């Protein structure tokens, strides 16, 4: 009897050990599958990124060809029209039409050239992101008022000083706020801007950064458009004045400032654009902090 009981106990504990080993093996298989799936997803993302980069290079070649083909003839055409305007009063309307048409085309060509220019002449100096945002909010008031949009700004950053070109970063903010305004219907909505302290990866090192979030309650961006939104000519809003280069230029400026930009969006639910820019360790002089990008104040818009 004792021998039989011992045999039963041995069999029982052997079964438990086998079950435990089997459970451990199954767990190891599941973990391996997770790692394999993660590796596959990263490989897929890498391949997709390579495809996008190849398309990006092809677009850049096309843009370069268009820009160079148009630039010089447009300058000659404008110069000829300006001379004609001075010498031929009778055909003044015709020459004015030519000049206006050339200027309209130049407004398309200039963004193309900026997008192409790999060595944009930036003037780097420390400046306050708060000043940039507050001034551009003044410029945006009229458009927001016309569309019943509530525009708000919340500064939670303890160091919103960036070393870069204030004019170009101002262009980034203008472009992003304009996109947010255009995404909201005439029935109204909200745009919120927030600054917070964060970090950004620079040369494989984490450095202090100011994070800017611009969130709107607009139409959102379809999922299939998100990955290509920074590609030239990719846009969710087509018009005569919108050739789809806005976010390409924004991305280039941010990259040239060693920053990062990310867009999260859902169709019909709005969009959140996040920009990280490394903070400056240099102090802003008192006179520099008073520099204004635009010589306009709040009173300019009160009459509208």
Image (spheres, rainbow, N blue to C red):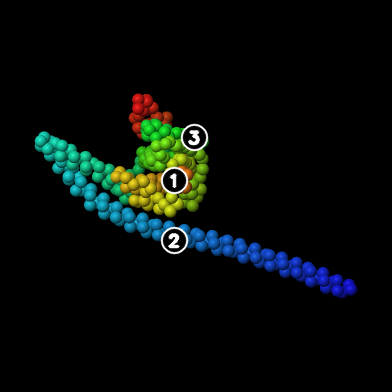
Please provide percent x and percent y for residue 138. 39, 31
Q: Secondary structure at mark 2?
A: helix
**Residue at the disc numbered 1:** 220
Q: Residue at x 44, y 61 (%)?
A: 47
Q: Nearer the viewer, residue 41 or 179?
A: 179
Would residue 297 be found to the left or right of residue 70 on screen? right
Residue 113 position (above or below residue 38):
above
Q: Which numbered disc, 1 or 2, marks the residue that appears first in the sequence?
A: 2
Say whether residue 31 is visible.
yes
Quarter of the picture holding the C terminus: top left
**Residue at the disc numbered 3:** 154
Q: Residue furthest front?
A: 187
Q: Secondary structure at mark 1?
A: loop
Q: Residue furthest right?
A: 1
Q: Secondary structure at mark 3?
A: strand
Query: Total marks drawn?
Result: 3
Q: How many other residues sit within 10 Å of disc 2, few (<14), some (14-19) or many (≥20)?
A: few
Please provide percent x and percent y for residue 65. 26, 54
Say whether residue 169 is visible.
no
Q: How many other residues sit within 10 Å of disc 1, few (<14), some (14-19) or many (≥20)?
A: many
Q: Residue at x 82, y 69 (%)?
A: 9
**Res 297 → quadrant:** top left
Please provide percent x and percent y for residue 257. 41, 45
Of labels 1 and 3, the one closer to you = 1
**Res 29 → quadrant:** bottom right
**Res 11 → quadrant:** bottom right
Which of the numbered marks, if any, corresponds to residue 47? 2
């Amino acid at each position: 009897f004792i021998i039989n009981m011992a045999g039963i106990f041995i069999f029982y504990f052997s079964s438990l050990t086998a079950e435990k080993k089997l459970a451990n093996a199954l767990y190891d298989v599941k973990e391996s599958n997770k790692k394999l799936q993660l590796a596959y997803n990263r490989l897929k993302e890498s391949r997709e990124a390579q495809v996008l980069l190849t398309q990006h290079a092809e677009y850049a070649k096309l843009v370069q060809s268009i820009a160079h083909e148009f630039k010089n003839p447009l300058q000659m055409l404008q110069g000829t029209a300006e001379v004609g305007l001075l010498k031929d009063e009778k055909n003044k309307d015709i020459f004015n039409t030519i000049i206006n048409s050339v200027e309209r085309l130049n407004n398309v060509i200039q963004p193309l050239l900026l997008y192409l220019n790999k060595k944009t002449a930036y003037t780097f100096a420390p400046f306050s992101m708060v000043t940039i945002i507050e001034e551009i909010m003044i410029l945006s008031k009229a458009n927001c008022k016309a569309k019943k949009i509530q525009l708000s700004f919340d500064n939670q950053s303890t160091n919103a000083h960036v070393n870069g070109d204030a004019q170009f970063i101002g262009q980034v903010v203008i472009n992003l706020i304009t996109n947010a305004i255009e995404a909201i219907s005439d029935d109204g909505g909200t745009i919120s801007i927030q600054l917070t302290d964060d970090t950004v990866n620079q040369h494989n090192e984490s450095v202090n950064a100011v994070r800017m979030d611009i969130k709107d309650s607009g139409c959102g961006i379809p999922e299939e458009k998100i990955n290509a939104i920074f590609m030239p000519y990719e846009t969710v809003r087509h018009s005569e004045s919108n050739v789809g280069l806005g976010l390409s230029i924004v991305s280039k400026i941010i990259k040239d400032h060693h920053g990062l930009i990310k867009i999260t969006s859902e169709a019909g639910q709005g969009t959140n654009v996040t920009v990280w820019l490394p903070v400056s360790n240099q102090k802003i002089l008192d006179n520099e902090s008073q520099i204004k990008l635009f010589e306009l104040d709040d009173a300019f818009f009160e009459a509208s």
